[in-house]
């Protein structure tokens, strides 16, 4: 039995189609007093497999009701978490020798940690972020820091609204790594960097606390892709690949490959954020009420038992890094010169 439906006609109505069809077959079975129930079930299963599969890939592997990243970052109060990342912004700015001669872009600037740090060195700074609420907060932080000259732009790291070579230094602190298409993000960051200019970013390595926590979260929110039904022989393995994890940006080998021959003098440096945390439960309390990504995951999961399981996995991920009231958050910095 092959089921060939167009995905468009099934969108939002696939289950209705199956139910109508199943009712029809069962009714016929009854009319002819012949037990075709087993056959009907097999038909149901075959169609359901295909509908699940089509709906999954129509939504890029995500339930369409799950808010997109743009919404996720506006949940909670990121600035209360970002305060712990301030030394990383200083580390980036220092490694790039940012000075008053530089035009600097902070990609996925969030509440402005790195942009404001560069501006305090006298640089001419632009901060760009996809989430308007982040920019509102960034403007308030800049006003408080008396860093008034920063230009704040709402936009996507994968499609930067700037001319080629507009900046001497392009930075990102835990930002560009969350753009879903890594190749597009890095292509854009390199495009807007002047030849001879510096590009530098901070990322979370997959093997340390934040990488492990992210992995635990991904396990609970990414639905397992359905198996391609046997009737769909043309499905290619390329489509079956999930989007790459943002944490791959924390792997120097992956970073080298992504930067390719567009850069010279790649330099990696590691650092540690020491975040005071009283207990694993305190960590959960803060992250689940202030961290957009975790709040989004909890809202998506809904089921209290599954949320408890997510909580357990996240705590197991961070406990090895919590010692003497300090949570150790290792990060990786990449610095390179545009060829
Ligand atoms: C972890 S926060 C980092 C913010 C800031 N750079 C810092 O150091 O605190 C990630 C930021 O990336 C932004 N973001 C995610 N995807 C983006 C994209 N495709 N383009 C621009 N910004 C993006 C989010 O809105 C959020 O502000």
Image (tube, helix red, strand yellow):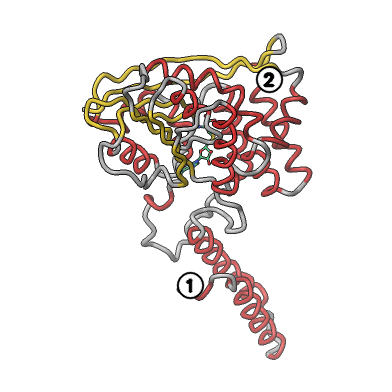
Of 164 and 31, nearer the camera is: 164
Q: Which residue is at a point 25% across and 28% down the rendered structure image?
A: 338
The residue beneath circle 2 is 319
Instruction: Tell me which numbered mark, 1 or 2, is placed earlier along the sequence.
Output: 1
Q: Is residue 236 left or right of residue 136?
A: left
Q: Nearer the viewer, residue 247 or 110?
A: 110
Kindly identify which residue carries mark 1.
8
Instruction: Check the image and report above or below for 287 versus 22.
Output: above
Report the quarter where the C terminus lies: top left
Q: Residue at x 50, y 63 (%)?
A: 54
Q: Please report the residue visible at 65 percent of the width from the left and 45 percent of the height from the top.
A: 296
Residue 81 screen position, x and y as percent: 64, 29
Q: CA distance from mark 1 to mark 2?
A: 46 Å
User: Decide: marks 1, 2 in contact (CB < 8 A)?
Assistant: no
On screen, residue 16 above or below 28? above
Q: Position of residue 315 (x, y in %)?
A: 70, 26
Q: Residue at x 35, y 43 (%)?
A: 184
- Relative horizontal placement of residue 31, taking residue 107 as reference (left or right): right
On the image, the x and y values in percent for residue 326 come to 67, 13
Q: Residue furthest top?
A: 324
Vertically, is 254 above or below 245?
Answer: above
Q: Residues within 10 Å of mark 1 (few under 14, many from 20)?
A: few
Is the CB atom of the residue marked by disc 2 within 8 angstroms of ligand 1's nearest atom? no
Assess disc 2: are there few (<14), some (14-19) or many (≥20) residues with their C-alpha within 10 Å of its C-alpha.
some
Instruction: Classify mark 2: helix, strand or loop.
Output: helix
Q: Which mark is residue 36?
A: none
Task: From the top left corner, tell me how far across and down residue 198 is, in percent.
Answer: 31, 25
Which type of secondary structure does the marked residue at label 1 adopt? Answer: helix
């Amino acid at each position: 039995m092959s089921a060939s439906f167009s995905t468009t006609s099934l969108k939002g109505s696939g289950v209705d189609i199956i139910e109508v069809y199943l009712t029809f077959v069962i009714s016929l079975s009854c009319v002819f007093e012949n037990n075709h129930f087993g056959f009907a079930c097999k038909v149901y299963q075959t169609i359901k497999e295909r509908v699940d599969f089509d709906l999954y890939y129509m939504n890029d592997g995500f339930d369409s009701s799950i808010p997109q990243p743009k919404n996720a970052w506006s949940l909670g109060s990121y600035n209360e978490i970002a305060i712990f990342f301030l030394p990383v912004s200083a580390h980036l700015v220092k490694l790039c020798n940012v000075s008053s001669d530089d035009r600097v872009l902070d990609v996925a600037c969030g509440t402005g940690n790195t942009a404001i740090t560069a501006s305090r060195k006298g640089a001419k700074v632009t901060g760009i972020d996809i989430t308007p609420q982040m920019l509102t907060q960034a403007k308030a932080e800049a006003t408080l820091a008396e860093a008034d000259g920063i230009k704040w732009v709402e936009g996507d790291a994968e499609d930067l609204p700037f001319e080629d070579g507009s900046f001497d230094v392009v930075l990102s602190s835990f930002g560009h790594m969350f753009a879903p298409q890594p190749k597009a993000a890095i292509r854009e960051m390199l495009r807007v960097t002047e030849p001879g200019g510096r590009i530098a970013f901070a990322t979370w390595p997959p093997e340390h606390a934040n990488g492990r926590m992210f992995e635990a979260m991904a396990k609970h929110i990414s639905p397992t892709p359905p198996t391609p039904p046997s009737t769909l022989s043309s499905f290619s393995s390329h489509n079956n690949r999930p989007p790459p994890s943002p944490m791959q940006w924390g792997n120097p080998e992956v970073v080298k490959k992504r930067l390719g021959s567009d850069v010279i003098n790649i330099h990696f440096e590691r650092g540690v954020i020491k975040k005071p945390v009283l207990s694993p439960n305190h960590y959960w309390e803060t992250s689940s009420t202030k961290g957009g990504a975790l709040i989004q995951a909890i809202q998506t999961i809904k089921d209290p038992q599954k949320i408890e399981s997510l909580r357990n996995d996240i705590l197991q991920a961070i406990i090895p890094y919590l010692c003497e009231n300090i949570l150790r958050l290792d990060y990786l910095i990449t610095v390179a010169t545009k060829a």
